[in-house]
Image (spheres, grey):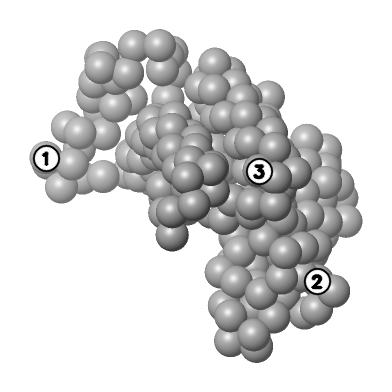
């Protein structure tokens, strides 16, 4: 154990706190602030530790096998919890979240198989991009629904190509053209950013899953053939 690993463990501890804050009235009761505001602060703090722990580990020469294992696990727990809460709050479609979380289970299984063969599968670039797309989606959707309700109605991601048919979206773009954006219009645009980032996260999830498997089989092939 070292400081970077303790920071990673702190990110894991934030996960149940995030769920409690968003699904119960405890934030209002104990702190007198919106649960969404506290959840956004907790989530951003946890996401920041994802940068800090890796930076410290490299700077202090404390990169460890345990850290390489814990870091992606902490990321998966944080994002999975946040996405599941978004589904509960009707801010994200369940099937998109199911694909993203399902991918995490597959990659975790792959890491376990690789570890049993002495190979540590480190986070790939696509995986990091996917992580940040998910962070943008979570924060944008929580900000857009800070009053407890989505700023648009009848917006189904099963038909994302027709988002402009939603009345609130049409109004927001009309006000944008007229330079008369309202507070709700900004929330609508934030909501669209969140939904778009969620779609990007799903695409990157599938793409990065392929990349992880390619990385794994490439190293297995090198071991069998004795290549460098």
The answer to whether residue 89 shows anywhere in this view is no
Please report the residue visible at 21 percent of the width from the left and 45 percent of the height from the top.
180
Seen in the picture, residue 102 relative to 63 is either above or below; the reply is: above
> Is 54 in front, or is 24?
54
Disc 1 to disc 2, how far (Cα)?
50 Å
> Is 11 in front, or is 106?
106
> Is 215 in front, or is 49?
215
Please report the residue visible at 58 percent of the width from the left and 86 percent of the height from the top.
59
Disc on the earlier residue, 3 or 1:
3
Residue of label 2: 6
Q: For mark 3, does the 10 Å Cα neighbourhood hold few (<14), some (14 to 19), or many (20 or more) residues? A: some
**Labels 2 and 3 touching (C-beta < 8 A):** no
* Residue 11 falls left or right of residue 211: right
The C terminus is located in which quarter? Answer: bottom left
Disc 2 to disc 3, how far (Cα)?
25 Å
Q: Residue furthest left?
A: 177
Between disc 1 and disc 2, the foreground one is: 2
Residue of label 1: 177
* Residue 114 numbered tag: 3
| Label 1 secondary element | helix
Instruction: Tell me where residue 125 appears, x and y as whole percent.
Output: 42, 54
Disc on the earlier residue, 1 or 2:
2
| Label 3 secondary element | helix
The N terminus is located in which quarter? Answer: bottom right
Between disc 2 and disc 3, the foreground one is: 3
Disc 3 to disc 1, how far (Cα)?
54 Å
Seen in the picture, residue 208 relative to 55 is either above or below; the reply is: above
* Residue 25 falls left or right of residue 110: right
């Amino acid at each position: 154990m070292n400081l970077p690993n303790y920071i990673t463990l702190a990110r894991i501890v934030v996960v149940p706190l995030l769920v409690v804050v968003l699904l119960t009235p405890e934030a209002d009761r104990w702190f007198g602030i919106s649960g969404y505001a506290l959840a956004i602060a907790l989530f951003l703090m946890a996401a920041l530790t994802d940068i800090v722990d890796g930076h410290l580990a490299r700077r202090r020469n404390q990169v460890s096998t345990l850290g390489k294992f814990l870091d992606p696990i902490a990321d998966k727990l944080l994002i999975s919890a946040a996405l599941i809460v978004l589904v509960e709050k009707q801010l994200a479609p369940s099937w998109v979240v199911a694909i993203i979380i399902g991918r995490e289970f597959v990659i975790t299984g792959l890491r376990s198989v690789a570890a049993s063969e002495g190979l540590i599968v480190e986070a790939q670039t696509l995986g990091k991009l996917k992580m940040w797309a998910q962070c943008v989606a979570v924060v944008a959707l929580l900000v857009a629904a800070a009053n407890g309700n989505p700023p648009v109605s009848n917006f189904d991601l099963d038909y994302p190509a027709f988002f402009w048919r939603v009345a609130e979206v049409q109004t927001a773009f009309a006000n944008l053209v007229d330079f008369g954006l309202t507070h709700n219009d900004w929330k609508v645009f934030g909501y669209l950013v969140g939904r778009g980032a969620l779609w990007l996260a799903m695409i990157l999830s599938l793409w990065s899953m392929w990349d992880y498997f390619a990385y794994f089989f490439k190293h297995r092939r090198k071991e069998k053939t004795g290549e460098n």
